[in-house]
Amino acid sequence: TYGQHFSVILSADNKKQIMIPQGFAHGFSVISETASVLYKIDQVYHKDSERGIRYDDPTFAIDWQLNLEEVIISEKDLILPNFDEIDWEV
C-alpha cells in the first residue's frame, strides 16, 4: 500500500468507522454542511513528531469531492511537502 491511497465515506447514516494504523498518513474532507470528527490516539500529542503530506500532492491526485478553490485549508497544511519531497530520515 506504500504510495497508494483510498477513500471511504463515513456518515451517521452508514455508521462506518475507520482504524488508521500508526504511521499511516490520513486526511479528511467534510462534504456535508457540518460534521463532527471524533478520533482517538495512542500517544500524547507531540508537535515535533507531527508530519504530513500536502493535500493536493500530484503523486496521489486525490479527489476530495470538493472544489479546491473554495475550501479552507489550514496554514499548517498549506506548508506540508509533497510525497516526493519528504525527508524519511527525520
Image (cartoon, helix red, strand yellow):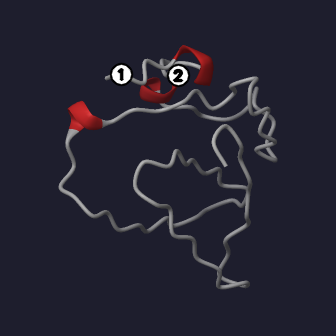
- Is residue 54 shown left or right of residue 32? left
The span from disc 2 to disc 1 (Cα, nearest Å) is: 22 Å
Element carrying mark 1? loop
| Percent position of residue 66, x then y | 79, 43
Earlier in the chain: of badge 2 and badge 1, it is: 2
- Is residue 2 shown left or right of residue 53? right
Work out whether 17 lies above or below 76. Answer: below
Q: In which quarter of the image is the C terminus?
A: top left
Task: Residue under label 2, please give it.
Answer: 78
| Percent position of residue 84, x then y | 61, 18
Work out whether 4 lies above or below 60. Answer: below
Within 10 angstroms of label 1, few (less than 14), some, or many (20 or more) residues? few
- Which residue is drawn at the image coordinates 51% and 69% (left, top)? 19
Work out whether 30 lies above or below 11. Answer: above
Element carrying mark 2? helix
Quadrant of residue 3 in the image?
top right
What amino acid type should be assigned to the residue bearing mark 1?
Glu
Within 10 angstroms of label 2, few (less than 14), some, or many (20 or more) residues? few
| Percent position of residue 44, x then y | 18, 55
- Is residue 79 shown left or right of residue 55? left
Work out whether 76 lies above or below 22. Answer: above
Quadrant of residue 75 in the image?
top left
Q: Which of 11 and 52 is in front in this view?
A: 52
Q: Which of 22 and 82 is in front in this view?
A: 22
- Which residue is drawn at the image coordinates 48% and 18% (left, top)? 79
Q: Residue 89 carries which label?
A: 1
Q: Residue 10 carries which label?
A: none
- Which residue is drawn at the image coordinates 67% and 49% (left, top)? 1
Q: Nearer the viewer, mark 2 or mark 1?
A: 1
- Which residue is drawn at the image coordinates 48% and 31% (left, top)? 74
| Percent position of residue 77, x then y | 49, 29
What amino acid type should be assigned to the residue bearing mark 2?
Leu
